[in-house]
Amino acid sequence: MPGSFEEVYAQSLNDPESFWAQAAEDVHWYKKWDKVLDDSRRPFYRWFTGGVVNSCYNALDLHVENGRADQPALIYDSPVTGTVKTFTYRELLDQVARFSGVLADQGVEKGDRVIIYMPMVPEAVIAMLACARIGAIHSVVFGGFAANELATRIDDSKPKLIVSASCGIEGNRIVSYKPLLDKAIEIAATKPGRCIVLQRPQEQASMIAGRDLDWSELMASAEPVDCVPVAATDPLYILYTSGTTGIPKGVVRDNGGHLVALKWSMKNIYGVDPGEVYWAASDVGWIVGHSYIVYAPLFSGCTTVLYEGKPVGTPDPGAFWRVISQHGVSVLFTAPTGIRALKREDPNGEFIRKYDLSRFRTLFLAGERVDPDTLVWAQEQINAPVIDHWWQTESGWPIGSNCIGIEMYPVKPGSCTKAVPGYDVRVLDDNGKEVANNQIGNIVVKLPLPPGCLPTLWNNDAGYQESYLDAYPGHYVTADAGYKDEDGYLWIMGRTDDIINVAGHRLSTGGMEEVLSSHPNVAECAVVGVADEIKGEIPLGFAVLKAGAAPADDLIVQELVQMVREEIGAFASFKVATIVKRLPKTRSGKILRGTMKNIADGVEYRIPATIDDPLVLDEIAQALITLGYPR
Ligand code: COA
Ligand code: AMP
């Protein structure tokens, strides 16, 4: 799309239908849409109604037919197993079509849900695309989630089948997945009929006869099946994300809008052409993995990298630069936390200079706020643009970015640059009135959201409206706070709800509080996110005990830490908690979590006028000092 950024942006808002219809010409349709933007059921907008597509066809078959059959589609690079394996588009298509055959043999049909609970192995990508191929709806659950979280997702999505693996590998630790899967099915009310398990050489899982099937055995005799055409508005996947309670929200993604938006984003936001190597160092269990490990690069005919490792320790802080130079990566997308870890372990960039980065062009960061120091450090070390961009599971692709494929703007460290074409981003005060430049407020997007964004929550239209649309009618609430400056740059400063970002992983402190509250000795509790040098934020727990005899405080704290690990997952990094006599509250009984966070972070704060007893803040400050806060 030619023109300056301002022109493209204006066109996307002034005439969204022709803007997205033009973008949609770039994808394969079995039948074109009747309506580009269907607003007949406001506020539930739908894109490309009447259109018929297949996302897997666009990701694989189309490229094989158009001359990319022998181009690498996916490079699996796994320092933790010492493996590098490349799949061409032809090979990936063959695997996917055969796994679709396996699913079909097991009775999976269009519209059925399939949960994928897997580590970062190519089979996870194959399973996702195989579902898309036959119109089944996948729901990938991040491998770091504990059994309880998996069970919640099983009960909400009611899968016909689950695809899993014997184990994941975290550095040099083997994480057994199968016992977690078995436990989750035991806890869940819904019992999926079949589980397909990939036995990895590092660990053999024990199988339950009559329910569990071996991936390799099934694939050995599988017949490939063809793509099933689906409606553009049919769901492609459900991805659960943290809400304000322990119950996750099932974000739904459709086929048509997602396809159009993601393909458009590769060229216009990331500046990537077909045939280039694009690497998102995330996990397939998160939105970044869905959109930018799997779908967008493959829709665009790029080579995508699936990396099973960490930025540091697998084996050293040169890992990212080794992958970039070995595979000729043009663009890397990762979370700021990874860069902070590199900055700590390789402050002078000695590991960076060991590798040939001549083909590397741009580093994109998202998932949490990037502190200006880290961004500037990265810019200086790699001598390439570092682009902070902002988005959410719900949007599925960037809301705010420097769209370098259209026109690159000067980088202002700490800002994600401007609203992306398609998103009419506004900053409102609590009464819904737009605020002036440089004034912080609630960041919302005026409806309709562009294609690719969530049309609703799984089986929960009312929850969608309540969570995102009710607060400011006509607008989608991002639940982020921030401001626009005089140049129209967006500055995202933090969440307005109780979501925290721990090493780029989205978590609900409310969910953690629910776990702590279930401890028999805990009367009430609070969890707040406090600043962490590497992970951005980490959770910190405060518990008030019930009256009467109780084990020693230290023992209870240990139990609380273990409970969060077992019920949510180790990745929550819940390692610090303290027992206090009282929690600070307003006179109406609301716990002053924000004030507690400020004390822990050593940030200046005002004692709220509505506080019940200001002395409690002193007690909290004292407890924090004992824990070493502020740092
Ligand atoms: N399966 C099982 N366990 C997992 C897991 C997974 N997929 N991912 C993380 N964990 C566990 C880890 O093993 C660790 O366990 P431990 O407490 O026993 O050590 C715990 O969860 C915390 O893991 P992690 O958040 O990875 O922290 P770390 O200290 O091991 O490493 C970083 C620190 C910064 C290197 C790492 O957090 C990192 O690379 N983060 C980037 C994450 C990312 O890409 N997020 C982006 C989403 S867009
Ligand atoms: P997730 O749904 O896991 O992608 O998390 C989305 C949330 O992460 C957003 O609502 C923001 O709070 C935060 N976030 C993501 N990217 C950025 C960014 N570039 N700057 C600031 N916050 C970000």
Image: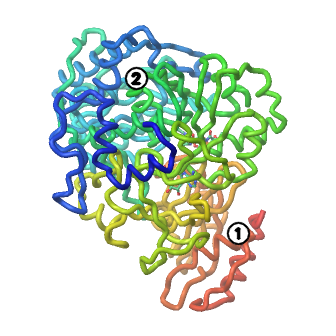
Q: How many marks?
A: 2
Q: Position of residue 567 (x, y in %)?
A: 46, 52
Mark 1, other Cα within 10 Å: few <14 / some 14–19 / many ≥20: many
Relative to 612, does residue 106 appear above or below in the rendering? above
Name the residue: 53% across, 64% down. Answer: 495
Quadrant containing the C terminus is bottom right
Q: Residue at x 79, y 25 (%)?
A: 353
188 displayed left or right of 508: left
SS for callout 1? helix
Question: Where is residue 96, by image quadrant?
Answer: top left
Residue 62, given in percent of the width and then of the height, sits at 31, 19
Q: Is residue 577 visible?
A: yes
Q: Earlier in the sequence, mark 1 or mark 2?
A: 2
The percent position of residue 9, horizontal first and vertical second, equals: 45, 50
Residue at figure coordinates x 66%, y 28% from the top left = 320
- What is the secondary structure assignment of the residue under circle 2? helix
Circle number at residue 600 = 1
Find out if the beta carbon at label 2 lies less than 8 Å from the nearest ligand 1 atom. no
- Within 10 Å of disc 2 (Cα), the crowding (few <14, some 14-19, many 20+) is many
**Image quadrant occupied by the N terminus:** top left
Colour theme:
rainbow
Judged left or right of residue 395, residue 463 is left
Quarter-of-image position of residue 45:
bottom left
Instruction: Identify residue type, mark 1.
Output: Ala
Q: In the figure, 182 relative to 47: above or below?
A: above
Q: Ligand 1 is in which quadrant of the figure?
A: top right
Q: Which residue is mark 2?
A: 123
Alpha-carbon span between mark 1 and mark 2? 43 Å
**Res 186 visible:** no
